[in-house]
Image (spheres, rainbow, N blue to C red):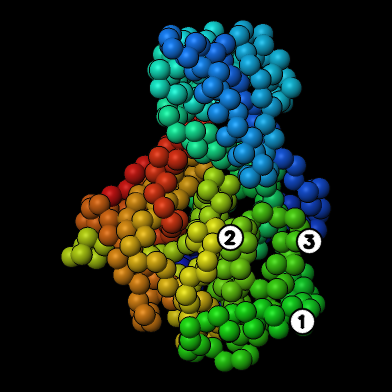
Amino acid sequence: MCEHCTRRELLGTGVAGGLMLAGATWTHAWASQSPPAQSRGKSRICVVFTGTPAPEDRDWGADARQIEAMKTHLAKAEKELGNIELIIGQSNSAQQTAALLKKAGPEAPVLAINVRNFALTRVVKPILDGSHPMVLFSLPASGHDWMYAPRWHSRGHRVTLLPSSKYDELERALRLLRVIPMMKQTRIILFPPARGTAPAQSPDQVKKRLGADVVAIEEKTFNEMIAAAEDNAVKAEIDSWTKNAKEIIEPNKEDIRKAARVSVALQRLMERERAQGLAVGTCMGWLSKGFPCLGFARLRDNGIPAACEGDMDSLLTMILFQYMIDRAGFQGNATFDTSRNALWTAHCTAALKMDGPDGDEAPYLLRGHSEVDGSGCVPEVQYRLGQIVTRTKLINLDTILASTGKIIEVPAKSVHGCRTQIVTEVRDAAKMAANWSSVLETEDAMTLLHRVVFYGDHMDSVHHLARLMGMKVVEEG
């Protein structure tokens, strides 16, 4: 444990201290006892066209030309997403639907496409009875079946509705549906202790609710991986971070070397374990070996969510969004300025590629960690002014906190707080501050404090995902 860390002094007592102690007696699977599975297969999604095409000039329904356009868009999305397999068919009866579902698999989510008036209501029973998550895509004038989707959801079925003339929405439907099977193939590496809400800390509950496996890694094992990190890879990591930085302020060569070596070791760990997520509960004590913040940033940029302070709620949030929108998240602490109707988010770990792995890197400085007398090496990322963001967190495995905002300020060089900072204009900062984390029954400061920020307004998709996964949404602010 880092004796210089002011945050650990703050959070190491009371409830948080109890969680730290609990983490020392990890009773669930260790990575050494739970070998990684084979590489993940593609996630199957069943696509059901309900009914026969309508004539082009009359009747309530989609015509053959529209259906062909939808099939073209589906094929394009399947190819571009790369990790899904579509089982596509037409159904005019419940029996035909059941046959399609059998082909796709008992847990396959369903994209139902309304083709003819009331065709869906005649063929949907096997989908609902089998508890298949379902997105209903309905073109305008393709029938009246769209109005039953909210009714099915209100009765407890995991159904959501996309009524739109935009064929690109079919890809969004597939992205939403793939989250569920992808979560069931997810392997998470944890350096105990786990932190956050009680259900998120429990590997058994995470497995039961989301399907993901959580396995622990011993620091002794990882220390060996740090020592074994290839010198050429470490040098390449140093060169990349130093040559692309706008400025190097506090870190010296040894700080950067240590952080780069840890970054390489973390990448090797995730490759070896074939894991899709990482949480480190002891990161504030890593100064002597090298802070993991550069490594966290690199992993997030490559599509592997990584959470500091063992925050399982934030990590699971990042994984859900990675599968849904292919974008990294910025996990951070909140603080308010009601005089400007603004909410700040700040942390010393931040992704560079917030537009996705193929996007451009944001500008950054290399800084010392703000809470350990400027020691170590972390990125201070300068995010895009004017960018609309979604601020969110999955809590208790069943509720998504969410809000939107716009970045109105990014410091040229941070002073107080953690290094990477954004100031966002929000809907009602005073109301937001007064009700902050009011739905959480905990006094743990970190659990109350953290949210994850993503580029873009994803509120609509958050509500769709919640319906498909049987979750609630609480809009903050």
Q: What element carries label 3?
A: helix
Viewer can see residue 209: no
What's the amino acid at mark 3?
Answer: Arg
Q: Nearer the viewer, residue 220 or 451?
A: 451
For the residue carrying disc 2, how many other residues have a C-alpha within 10 Å: few (<14), some (14-19), or many (20+)? few
What's the amino acid at mark 2?
Answer: Asp
Q: Which of 473 and 1 is in front in this view?
A: 473
Residue bearing mark 3: 272
Q: In this view, does 252 lie above or below 66?
A: below
Residue bearing mark 1: 232
- Residue at (66%, 54%) from the top-left corner? 276
Q: Sequence order check: which comes first, mark 3 or mark 2? A: 3
Label 1, label 3: how many angstroms apart (C-alpha)?
19 Å
Side of 473 where 281 appears, left or right: right
For the residue carrying disc 3, how many other residues have a C-alpha within 10 Å: few (<14), some (14-19), or many (20+)? few
Q: Residue furthest front?
A: 57
Residue bearing mark 2: 358
Q: Is residue 263 above or below residue 120?
A: below
Number of the front mark, 2 or 1: 2
What's the amino acid at mark 1?
Answer: Asn
Q: Nearer the viewer, residue 249 or 50?
A: 50
Badge number at residue 119: none
Viewer can see residue 97: yes
In percent of width and height, residue 450 lies at 43, 59
- Residue at (48%, 83%) from the top-left corner? 246
Number of the front mark, 1 or 3: 1
In percent of width and height, residue 233 lies at 74, 78
**Residue 357's image quarter?**
bottom right
In percent of width and height, residue 187 lies at 69, 50
Label 2, label 1: how many angstroms apart (C-alpha)?
24 Å
Q: What element carries label 1?
A: helix
